[in-house]
Amino acid sequence: MNLHGSDRTAYAYLLGLYLGDGCLSPHPHGGYHLRIACADTWPGLIDLCRRAITAVQPCAPVYTLRKEGCVMVTSYDRHWPRLFPQHGPGKKHERPIALVAWQRAVVEAHPWDFVRGLIHSDGCRVTNWTEKTIGGRRKRYEYPRYFFSNASTDILRLFTDALDAVGVEWKPANQARTVQNISVAKRASVVLMDRHVGPKW
């Protein structure tokens, strides 16, 4: 794909959003709708998603559809399957997900934008707390932490590979039967994530 400059940065971010909470829906008269589900509690995320779509496909109209608890940021264009070749029948976690060569090149050049898109879709920044007894007195300590949750082991691997590339330490956490979680809790890594990703807003 012929992506240049800021388009590549926007695409890396949009790819993260798509892999987390996006899909392509065929239109009855041809072409496809790109749909990215954004929780309506994060108006900043909705705006970032709209801007990323416009940067990647300037001629494709972008609009929002309100659903219960979320907003579907939607855009119609014939070329979305070329931009997201991971599109296919069924759910993402039920089929292999791999980046093609030009996508890998974009992600390798803009790993933080890719990580940011994934966190903004299926991730979060939370404040954990614990209590310790020091000198006979119980003290409460709070510390920030990032989580990324996804049912696709392939998408999880793309996320952790990108974290490795930018020097962020991570570990599996709170594994469930259907969803797996990645945790970033080391102080230096959280500082890096805060600098390049930050919480949703």
Image (cartoon, helix red, strand yellow):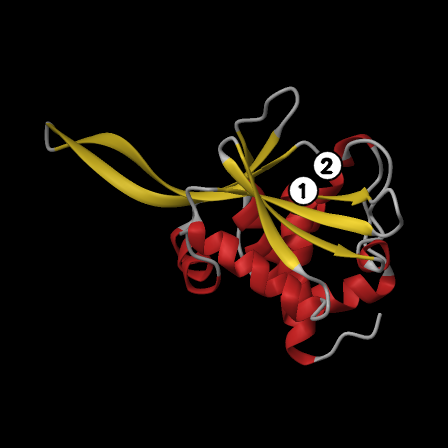
Q: Which amino acid, by three-letter code, is at mark 2?
A: Thr
Observer able to see residue 166: no
| Residue 168 drawn above or below residue 19 | below
| Residue 125 drawn above or below residue 110 | above
Point out residue 69 in the picture as x, y percentages from the top left corner.
49, 33
Q: Which amino acid, by three-letter code, is at mark 1?
A: Leu
Which quarter of the rendering shows the N terminus?
bottom right
Residue in front for this viewpoint, 16 or 189: 16
Point out residue 33 in the picture as x, y percentages from the top left corner.
75, 49
Observer able to see residue 136: yes
Q: Which mark is residue 50?
A: none
Which residue was labeled with disc 2?
A: 153
Which residue corresponds to the image point at 31% horizontal and 44% vertical from the top-left? 143
Which residue corresponds to the image point at 67% horizontal and 63% vertical from the top-left? 12
Dot 1 crowding, Cα within 10 Å, few <14, some 14–19, many 20+:
some
Which residue was labeled with disc 1?
A: 156
